[in-house]
Image: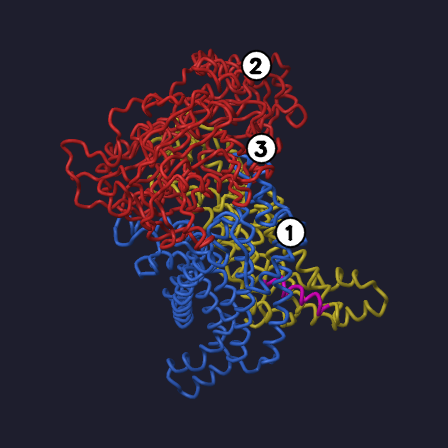
Amino acid sequence: MMNKLLLTTVLSVGLCLPAIAAQVQPGETLAENQEYTYWLLDAIKSMDPQINTDVEGSGILRALFEGLYNEDQNGGLVPGVATDHELSDDKTVYTFHLRDNAKWSNGDPVTAQDFVYAWKRLADPKTASEYAWYMELMQVKNASKIIAGEAPVDDLGVKAVDDHTFEVTIEAPLPYFPKMLTHASTFPVNQKAIEQFGDKWTEPGNLVGNGAYLLKEHILGEKVVMEPNPAYWDNEHTILTKVTALTINDENAALTRYLAGELDRTQIPAGQYPRLKQEYPDQAISVPQSCSYIYMFNVDKEKGPAALQDVRVRKALSYAIDRDIIVNNILQGGQAPSYNWTHAATEGFKLPEIDYAKWTQEERTAKAKELLAEAGYGPDNPLKITLNYNTSEAHKKIAIAVQQFWKGVGVDLTLNNMEWKVHTDKMQNQDFEVARYAWCGDYNEASTYLDLFTSYSGHNNGKFFSERYDELMKQSKTAADPNPMYTEAEQILAEEMPMAPIYQYTKVEMIKPDMRGLGLNNLMQNWYLKDMYRVAN
Amino acid sequence: MFSFVVKRLAVAVPTLLLLIVISFLLMHAAPGGPFTQERALPPQVLANLEAKYGLDQPLWRQLVTYVWGIVAHFDFGPSFIYKDRTVNEIIAQGFPVTLTYGSVSFVVAVIVGITLGVAAAIRHNSWLDYLAVGISIGAQVLPNFVMAPLLLLTFTWWLGWLPGGGWEDGQWQYMVMPVIALSTSYMASIARLTRASMLEVLTSNHIRTARAKGLPERQVILRHALKPALLPVMSYLGPAFVAMITGSVVVDFFFSTGGIGRAFVDSALNRDYAVMLGITILVGALTILFNLVVDVLYGWIDPKIRY
Amino acid sequence: MAIDVRAMDRLAEGEVKGRSPWADARRRFFRNKAAVAGMVTLLLITALALFGDALAQWSNEEIDFTVMGQAAQLGQPSIANGHYFGTDDLGRDLYSRTLQGTRISLMVGIVGSLIAVVVGTLYGAVSGYVGGRTDQIMMRIVDILLAVPFMFVVILLLVMFGRSLFMLFFGIGLMSWLNMARIVRGQTLSLKHKEYVEAAQATGVPTFTIILRHVVPNLVGIVAVYATLLVPEMILIESFISFLGLGVQEPLTSLGALISEGARTIYYGTTWQLLWPLAFFIATLFSFFFVGDGLRDALDPKDR
């Protein structure tokens, strides 16, 4: 009754080898020095997989722990602790087969019970995880009720059939479920260590992990040091001997230190890419990253400004933004000007025809003026509106430029910069008119973006509602090929313009030329230290 | 003197309490909380979190619990953002760092500042005086957030002499730039103060007497002029020392030293209530302590002062 | 950022005697070359800040799209394209931005200092004049507030209530009236037993009127000195707040904000973005310090 599926057939990215561990290419010789130092903007907030919430922390967690699946250099799934899985006929029961040689750093075997423990821990209200909603997003059975405290934790749809068989029941078929398993919050944790050390279990020395690296040192706001984990099942293929992550709050200072040879990888500040590319062509890189930058309009009937209720005004505002200037003259890091919501490189996603994307900026500006005039705004009655943005050099520059673009079509924009918590709080309470917003995909599939504009999404801060849109997104969950629905949903967004798309992200970085295995082609920009190595020049 | 110290310490307690209450209320009045994030948390998750950290309690009860934790167990609570750590741990890690480079900066500022000030006063209206005044005003008005990147550019990038940041348990090469960036403006203030008061003392009667007695100039200055001249400087040192510790935001920001200056600003921005309160109390207590130390020293230098 | 409080106290204790103390003071002030140079510089900067916009070819918020994105190559100071001081990273004219920033910085400095002066003078005068238990309580409050790390409170205020010019002035003024109050109180104590004050008391003039009419005017000298020295301190504090990203809202700017931006991009060869605003900043602060020192020397009776 179970339908045995090979991992590769579930996932569309072709992979011919079980690409695990560092893949030293033919012709490459390893460098003698295999130490790697990279930049962190902020201190790591938590080393606990179920507590961590940020991207930088996830990078380190992927080294200290290993989930059911990993991602390869292109973002395709490869075996992690699980070697493969089966899916029931009704597509709601996943049975994962775990490898029998996976070990914790204290020598214990990694078993299905560890996953059961970790997943229940994530959903447990007592853990109070900020990522508990990820269990809901994965639609694990009873997750919502458990988080709400309406059902006991043991009701969670996870089961250890035996030591090496882990079974998950989800509430409805979810085609991209396996892709969600590379997220750090689903990683197993060692019950023994947690019970022994309590809140202190993530300290170096206490932390028991099943990943390729061990935590050696963690000084808040200064650095994290990791070394290979001899107990890791594939330790013989781990190449980097020491990895250091340095917290440097100022990206310009970080770049200086990179250039002085103290770092092997750092971010390039906005606007500096062209110059660095010219000076260091083999070090400056710009690769697509799954995030989308927009200005969200508040179309809430009660709290939003009356002007933004008018779709003509929203369109005019969107048309008047010269995205080419923003990406080419401000950001200058190979970002793509954007006229839609989903990142264009998202797997399987087909960009719809969006008319204004093909116009010239003169045409767009002319159209914007025309629409504003139709809506009753003009030189004697200028549209007055406020933009909220949070503190950041790049956000500020874009906001200032947009102020000038909109001035060009007779819109009087007031800039309102606030620090991040205030910005977020105001957005979530619909206390804004236009607000800067960005969304990064949780997994490489268009629904991670498009779900946001459904009426039932918790992140739809502008309160845009469209019945047809909701309907499409609901259908897409069970459809064999959801992509036509995604395309239509994007068309609705272009027609209704609940937000003005601005650009799609790239990761713009300086990386030492001898570094390999960074997974730069992976749109999610998830890297694995165990895959990295340095080559001799 | 003992009763003076006791009296001052008795006032310190209500002062700190007042500080706690004001900061506490300010923080809770601010929009957004520690768990406000770009991806709004589902209401039940938020409720679970608030229950865990006691944020669902009425404000007055949270305040009482907090103060009681400090009084009874010296426990400043858990960090809401760095969830693996308590406030005590965060301060225990960051404060020694700040204290180390703060103290070194303080000593450097005092020694260089006083030397410069005395030298300028002795050679009043000479080129040395003008140079010292020029340097000290210049140093005083050059903000340290300008100096820090300039130092990085010069010593790390151009010359390659010093590492661009980190702490590494306070090895000297990691301390050079933080100390320069932090001490310069205080050094300048001390120099200006010393010069002004030295000039005044040098024209006073007892120095004229000392000179008239034919004492060597060196002795006049070191034995008779310096001590009274330093009195006004003393009163500046208490606040300066505390300011060096709170001013460490810039140093932590540019040189990744991991001190509490940056931790404070971060906690304010992140609404990490407990960390913010903890550091505010620490700095408040230090301020009180150093003002007291200065006053005691003052009495020791100048016995005419009565408590 | 030191203000020589002890020297102030000393000044406060001294009594200004003589037939025309103000004329004497003026003469002494104008003999002090540094102070005069400072005053002239200050006047020039103020004039430029107020009227220099007439020469500007760009407003402080206009973006020069021909320069935008290539500030390092095309944005250097040039008479030809009208950017006398060059442009910032976005291609905005640094000349008009520097002038506008100077206006804000001067305003913050002066208004912050005025708040300190008004609150501090009144508080100190009332405390000193009324005396007794009121005096004790009022001074104890000042002592307590002096122990509060005010930079922290300012950051808290700005974070908590969002930023606005008002909040900025409020926060900065809040930090600085305490020392003023102490100095003024000391001075008032000595004024309290003057004949004209006692005469006013005897004729039944209300207390508050006496404070305003007879006490406060006699504090002008010391208050002026302190206020002058407070201005650069305020400007420095504002620059630190700007560095933290909590300063004035774009498109407005301040010298502190411009310097902070310029300093962060110093690595990329756009030195004019730091140097021009920094020159204005340093010149302004230097001048205030010199003028303040000059005023103090001029008004200090011991130097006669």
The N terminus of chain B - image quarter? bottom right
Label ID, residue A468: 2
Which residue is disc 1 drawn over? B25
Q: Is residue A405 above or below residue B160?
A: above
Are the residues under badges 2 and 3 in a single subunit?
yes
Query: Disc 1 marks which amino acid?
Result: Leu
For mark 3, does the 10 Å Cα neighbourhood hold few (<14), some (14 to 19), or many (20 or more) residues? many
The CA span between labels 3 and 1 is 23 Å
User: Disc 2 versus disc 1: distance between alpha carbons?
Assistant: 46 Å
Q: Residue A1 at x, y = what percent?
A: 41, 21
Q: Amino acid at mark 3?
A: Met
Mark 1 lies on a secondary structure that is helix
**Colour of chain A in the image:** red
- The chain carrying label 2 is A
Q: Amino acid at mark 2?
A: Arg
Spot occupied by residue B61 in the image (x, y as percentages of width and height)? 67, 54
* For residue B286, side relative to residue C207 (left or right): left
SS state under label 2:
helix
Q: Are marks 3 and 1 in contact (CB under 8 Å)?
A: no
Q: Quadrant of residue A523?
A: top left
The chain coloured blue is B
Whether pointer 2 and pointer 3 mark residues with C-beta atoms closer than 8 Å, the reply is no
Q: Which residue is mark 3?
A: A427
Q: In front of the other: label 2 or label 1? A: 2
Magenta span: C135-147
> Circle 3 sits in a helix, a strand or a loop, which is it?
helix
Tell me the mark number nearer the camera, choosing from 2 and 3: 2
Say if labels 3 and 1 share a chain.
Answer: no
